[in-house]
Amino acid sequence: MNYKIAILEDNPAEAEYVTALVDRWGKEAGHTLSIAGYPSAEAFLFQYEDQKSVDILLLDIEMGQMNGMELARRIRQADEMMQMVFITGYPDFISEGYEVSALHYLMKPVAPEKLWAVLDKAAARLAREEKRLDVTYDRKTDYVPLSRILYVEAQKQYVLIHTLEETYRMKKSLAKTEEELDEYFLQVHRSFCVNLRHVVQIKSGGVVLKNGEEIPISRGMAETIGQEMIRLF
């Protein structure tokens, strides 16, 4: 599986140590990881506000102006799926970890086996809680979380899977692809199926997504989209 993992640690030596452990876990478990490190909560938020695409967050608590617990509360308001693991030398915040649905609380210096066990648990929970789309292209397959897909576009005998990070081109019909999506996806045009999670504005001729893109919709579709969003959200 592919996972995006963020590590928040203001101590460079600690950050390097945890990154090495995470990288080893990914290789031994057969996962493809994208690992990014951040020295502060503010640095992470700057990136996160632009691309909300983190599966597992490993974070310290005592960091700069905004501590890890404050950051976790802020993230939880918009993201219930992210798996959060606190790695810290301060046991005083354990009870607060439950408030943000933290997966686990590890004390420094973290033992490799304990971290790997928690990462196994995080991966299992992600696989269980969020459906993914098998996207096959260039003789390889990515398992893309449905929540990251902005929309699916028909292109002759192919479909373009537009996600928060990139666009995949897969040889498959739009109708067949729709069968593997969830109720948040709605075909709004003969060539477009939109993820309603990302719609921020409905116009008479199109919908605007969180990333600023505008997708055309069929005549009379605006009311249907509005009704579906009321039902789902």
Image (cartoon, grey):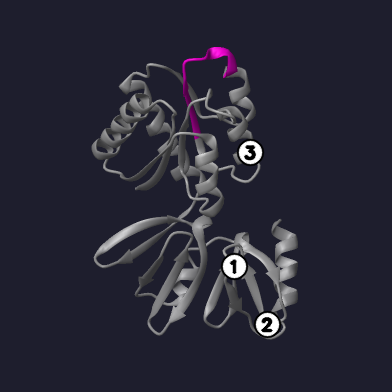
Q: Which residues are magenta?
A: 84-93
User: In the rendered structure, which amino acid carries the disc numbered 2?
Assistant: Gly
Work out which residue is located at the far front of the displayed protein and give it: 65
**Looking at this view, is 106 or 59 the one in front?**
59
Say which residue label 3 marks.
74
Q: Is residue 134 left or right of residue 147?
A: left
Q: Earlier in the sequence, mark 2 or mark 1?
A: 2
Q: Earlier in the sequence, mark 2 or mark 3?
A: 3
Q: Is residue 104 magenta?
A: no
Pointer 2 with pointer 1, Cβ within 8 A: no
Residue 106, percent across and down? 45, 20
Distance between the Cα atoms at labels 2 and 3? 35 Å
**Residue 64: image tag:** none
Residue at 34% x, 75% y is 171
Say which residue label 1 marks.
212
Residue 199, percent across and down? 64, 65
Residue at 63% x, 46% y is 78
Relative height, residue 8 to residue 128 (above, below): above
Label 3 sits on a secondary structure element that is helix
Distance between the Cα atoms at labels 3 and 1? 23 Å
User: In the rendered structure, which amino acid carries the disc numbered 3?
Assistant: Arg
Pointer 2 with pointer 3, Cβ within 8 A: no
| Count of numbered circles on the image | 3
Residue at 32% x, 65% y is 136
User: In the rendered structure, which amino acid carries the disc numbered 1?
Assistant: Gly
**Looking at this view, is 175 or 153 the one in front?**
153
Residue 53, percent across and down? 48, 50
Report the mark closest to the observer, 2 or 3.
3
Few, some or many residues within 10 Å of mark 1 (<14, 14–19, 20+) = few
Q: Is residue 104 left or right of residue 202?
A: left
Report the mark closest to the observer, 2 or 1.
1
